[in-house]
Image: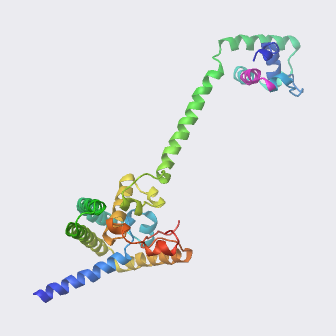
């Protein structure tokens, strides 16, 4: 049972890494150019929107929680709090980050499942092209996905 | 202003300038060119002449001196009952100003001045492409970008100041 769970978690982690790496950031399904490029149907866009709307309250809460924990840690560090206190707050930050990450990745997986394979590939290709363009221009921020210029 | 007063053009002179005899080029006195009041008055006269004149050009060109005087008198009489056009100008300007403000408001969201934001919000500034979205979608877009950065740990955490950022060192920012 443990092995099964470990395997499932590993698969989830791998899938999540893939989803994160290839999924454009932001509300890309609402960008007409991307939607047109990958042939996103209205029905697909609606289902993706439904997934996001379902998860939005959770994302807002978890994001706020993470920011609060970050603030607490920052305050503790600025006030030269004892090491154990800072360690606890650091754990709290990382736990909050993990919770947020988990919710986000599961949402991305749900969104990915709404796309056809070729749509997914096009989305990946668009992101790859954007990365290359960004790389050739230089000076772009790490990890910041930019959509192709119109 | 006082220096101009003695030389301001009379209504008759303005009328003559606003409706010069056919075939004669309009020669403006130097005073009209330098006096804003007379310049404006001449423009109003011209506009009034256009408003009031309902006759065809050909009969106008064929007028005798007496007919010209009669037309002048009629125009003067009409002008005394016409609301000065000057009063319409503020409305026109107000409309133009309102239109300009509206355009500025519509354009402004894409180029807002930087304001103090939470670190994550700064890191996930909404790109200009957000302008093609509704306000709610743009807010959602910003949320998703914030979440992505926070969950990846790209944001400057509380411990960010403990060690120098290697990239910043390389770029000579530190």
Asked which colour scheme the image uses, the reply is rainbow
Indicate the position of residue B3 as horizontal and vertical percent values.
Answer: 80, 16
**On screen, B77 above or below B43?**
above
Q: Point out the residue furthest to the left here.
A: A1
Indicate the position of residue B138 as horizontal and vertical percent values.
Answer: 39, 57
Q: Point out the residue furthest to the right here.
A: B24
Is residue B159 or residue B11 the one in the foreground?
Answer: B159
Is residue B8 or residue A124 the one in the foreground?
Answer: B8
**On screen, A10 above or below B141?**
below
Can the viewer see residue A84 in this picture?
yes
Indicate the position of residue B150 as horizontal and vertical percent values.
Answer: 32, 67
Q: Which residues are magenta?
A: B34-44
* Residue appearing at x 86%, y 27% in the figure: B26
Is residue A77 or residue A58 the one in the foreground?
Answer: A77
Looking at the magenta stretch, what is its main secondary structure?
Answer: helix
Q: Is residue B40 left or right of residue A143?
A: right
Q: Quadrant of residue A117?
A: bottom left
Quadrant of the rendering where the N terminus of chain B is positioned = top right
Q: Quadrant of residue A82?
A: bottom left
Is residue A83 or residue B72 the one in the foreground?
Answer: A83
Can the viewer see residue B8 in this picture?
no
As for residue B43 lying within the magenta part, the answer is: yes
Q: Quadrant of residue B10?
A: top right
As for residue A108 lying within the magenta part, the answer is: no
* Residue appearing at x 33%, y 72% in the figure: B152
Indicate the position of residue A6 as horizontal and vertical percent values.
Answer: 17, 85
Q: How many numbered discs?
A: 0
């Amino acid at each position: 049972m443990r092995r099964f769970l470990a395997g499932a978690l590993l698969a989830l982690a791998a899938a999540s890494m893939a989803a994160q790496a290839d999924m454009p950031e932001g509300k890309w399904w609402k960008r007409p150019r991307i939607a047109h490029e990958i042939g996103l149907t209205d029905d697909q866009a609606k289902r993706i929107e439904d997934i996001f709307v379902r998860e939005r309250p959770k994302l807002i809460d978890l994001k706020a929680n993470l920011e609060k924990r970050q603030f607490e840690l920052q305050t503790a560090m600025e006030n030269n709090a004892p090491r154990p206190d800072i360690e606890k707050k650091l754990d709290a930050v990382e736990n909050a980050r993990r919770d947020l990450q988990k919710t986000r990745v599961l949402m991305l997986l749900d969104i990915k499942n709404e796309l056809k394979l070729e749509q997914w590939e096009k989305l990946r290709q668009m992101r790859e092209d954007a990365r290359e363009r960004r790389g050739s221009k230089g000076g772009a921020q790490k990890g910041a996905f930019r959509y192709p210029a119109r | 202003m006082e220096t101009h007063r003695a030389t301001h053009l009379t209504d008759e002179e303005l009328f003559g300038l606003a409706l010069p005899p056919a075939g004669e080029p309009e020669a403006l006195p130097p005073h009209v060119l330098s006096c804003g009041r007379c310049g404006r008055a001449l423009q109003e006269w011209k506009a009034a002449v256009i408003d009031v004149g309902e006759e065809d050009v050909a009969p106008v060109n064929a007028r005798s001196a007496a007919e010209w005087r009669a037309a002048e008198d009629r125009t003067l009489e009409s002008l005394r009952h016409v609301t000065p056009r000057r009063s319409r100008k503020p409305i026109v300007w107000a409309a133009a100003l309102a239109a300009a403000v509206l355009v500025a408001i519509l354009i402004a969201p894409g180029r807002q001045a930087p304001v103090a934001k939470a670190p994550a919000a700064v890191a996930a500034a909404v790109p200009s492409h957000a302008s093609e979205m509704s306000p709610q979608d743009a807010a959602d877009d910003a949320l998703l970008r914030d979440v992505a950065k926070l969950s990846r740990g790209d944001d400057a955490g509380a411990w960010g100041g403990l060690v120098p950022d290697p990239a910043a060192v390389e770029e000579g920012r530190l």
